[in-house]
Amino acid sequence: MKNTKQVLALAMAVAMAAGLLAGCGSSASTGSDSADNSTDSSASGAAFKIGGTGPLTGANAIYGNACKNGAQIAVDEINAEGGDIQFELNYQDDESDAEKAVNAYNTLKDWGMQLSLGSVTSKPCEATAAETYSDRIFALTPSASSTATTEGKDNMFQMCFIDPAQGTLAADKIAEKQLGTKIAIIWKNDDVYSTGIHDKFVEEAKTKGLEVVSDMTFTDSSANDFSVQLNDAKSKDAELVFLPIYYQPASLILKQAHDMGFQTTFFGVDGMDGILTLEGFDTSLAEGLMLMTPFNADSTDEKTASFVKKYQEQFGETPNQFAADAYDCVYAYKAALENAGAAPDMSAEDLCDKMVEQFTSMTFDGLTGTGATWSAEGAVTKDPTVVVIKDGKYVNV
């Protein structure tokens, strides 16, 4: 009897120890850095894990946080519906650096990411796209537009326009709307985004009767003084200055052009979106600035107005196109998962196969365009809108 009691006591002790160890294991798995940046508002806990990397700090943080915030609103809306598709979102900071993006990606992979939002900016996304391709995790980036991001990767897709498409569309729009025939270009030749748009623009401009009278570059090390580029454009009587660059250097160009009395039309692409919310920037300098964007926060349609209202209430600012693209990414995933009959207990590899099949065959209506379709190479087809800034707002041209 004594031996029996000892055996029972030992068995109970083992069971208790096992329970404690299991509890420790569970705690450790959710106590990593990745959990700090994840949100799960699903009621059942059975959620698809979506992860992305972007610059949440640093010079390009406006883009990364916009994508994170836009995606979060979509996740919250979908989870609140209580349907079969629920999401858990995790965004990691990559500071717009390729090496840090890979580290962030590995954090997401350890967390259990099943579907990826890629990376926000092009160079980091090129790096993480190589990882998602190797690991067979499907990726849909809201904003990385370099063709190198998707090249040779059947599971890397884009919600935004690819760089060459923006170059072609910009030349077409400038010619169509007769904005000028003598064109100056100021572009960043150490950036794949700027280079891709520039090269295609120059090619298309020739077919549209546009003359590139000034074609000047800059790099990170020379991004503070644009007097040489602006004086060259001015001396060549440029009727329009095309800026295939992001809004930070563009803000300096507008300021310096104003200071030197150079009055002309400035025309940007989607990287210009966000200039009106740049801290310390005099928005009156952007008056008359034209740009291409798939999203206009000042639009009065019900879907856009609802998104803008929620974004402003939660984050205290007006969303840019990056936020809208990320919002659309989450809803596109929802549509594809529903169409595929996918379940959250499926492996990332199995989901990848289903997402490739769905995205190459479906049509998607979102904030950033209706009737969007994707090629087998992952490029999206949808029409951009040309807007002009008037009184601090976007007005369709």
Image (cartoon, grey):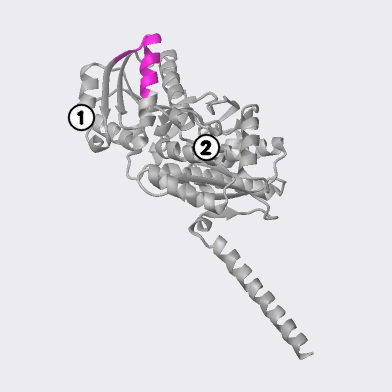
- x and y, in percent, of residue 94 in the image: 42, 47
Instruction: Identify the secondary structure beneath mark 1.
Output: helix
Considering the image in quadrants, where does the N terminus appear? bottom right
Residue 308, image quadrant: top right
Q: Which residues are magenta?
A: 198-212
* Amino acid marked by disc 1: Ser
Compared across the picture, whether 245 is left or right of 21 comes to left
Furthest residue to the front?
3
* Image coordinates for residue 319, horizontal then vertical, percent: 49, 41
Q: Is residue 324 visible?
A: no
What residue is shown at x 55% (from left), y 30% (from top)? 154
Residue 275 part of the magenta-drawn span: no
Taking the spot 62% from the left edge, 73% from the top edge, the residue there is 20
- Crowding near pointer 2: few (<14 within 10 Å), some, many (20+)? some
Labelled disc at residue 227: 1
In the picture, the disc for residue 133 is 2
Q: Nearer the viewer, residue 318 or 268?
A: 268
How many numbered badges does the structure rendering display?
A: 2
Which residue sits at x=71%, y=78%?
A: 11
How packed is label 1: few (under 14 Cα within 10 Å), some, or many (20 or more)? few
202 part of magenta stretch: yes
Q: Secondary structure at mark 2?
A: helix
Which is nearer the eye, 324 or 51?
A: 51
Residue at the (23%, 16%) spot, across then down: 236
Residue 258: which quarter of the image? top left
